[in-house]
Amino acid sequence: MAVRIRLARKGRKRTAYYHVVVADSRSPRDGRYIEKIGIYNPITNPATIELDFNKALDWLQNGALPTETCRAILSVKGVLIKKHLLEGVKKGAFDEAEATKRFEAWMKQNEEKIEARKSGLEKSKDDKVDIRLAAEKKINEARAARLAKRQADLAAKAEAEANPKPAPEEQAPVENTAEAPAPDEVAPETPSEEKSAE
């Protein structure tokens, strides 16, 4: 019987969360399992992972194979690095105190990385809120300026109606008095032209 560490889907449509379970590889995804060792909720940002560290480590040492997603979950929680360090102790590469020291250093580094990501997410959320507020403020200022302009126009129009100005005297349009050019006059023939005509 091949034992797998895998996810069993729970929850309703579009709000799924998962149980991390140890199950026979032949059993259905959401079917019978041997033991539940944790919960994984990918909807939250960052994802929520609750895992029984010791049970997961025991199952790994007894030969259970994790799926790809469960391998990532176990890696984030430090189960895989702990298993690796314990195998190093068994082989005599270093003693248990050194393994504990290395594991604690890794966990501290991992926690700092997770905290940095959480603070980055909070900062980006605050930045988005600030950008939205600035855009909304700009829109409100533009609206207020248009409203003030409209009210000023209405006030000027009402004042113009209340105090009508005397109409300026209409002047007659100036006619064009320039004389039109005279039609071409026929010039009398000169005597030299008369001689040439004969």
Image (tube, rainbow, N blue to C red):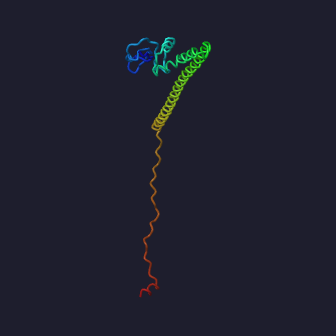
Please state the horizontal and vertical placement of residue 2, each as a whole percent of the image: 42, 16
Mark count: 0
Q: Quadrant of residue 21?
A: top left
148 relative to 29 in the view: left or right: right
Visible residue check, residue 178: yes
The x and y percentages for residue 27 are 38, 16
Quick one: 140 or 12, which is closer to the camera? 12
Q: Is residue 43 visible?
A: no
- Name the foreground residue: 95 vs 163: 95
Q: Is residue 127 above or below residue 184?
A: above
34, 147: nearer the viewer: 34
* Residue drawn at (44%, 66%) of the image: 180
Q: Position of residue 18 (x, y in %)?
A: 43, 17
Residue 5 position by quadrant: top left
- 90 relative to 137, above or below: above
Figure quadrant of the C terminus: bottom left
What's the residue at 37%, 15% (across, down)?
Answer: 31
Quarter of the image with the N terminus in it? top left
Residue 139 in picture, x, y percent from top left: 49, 31
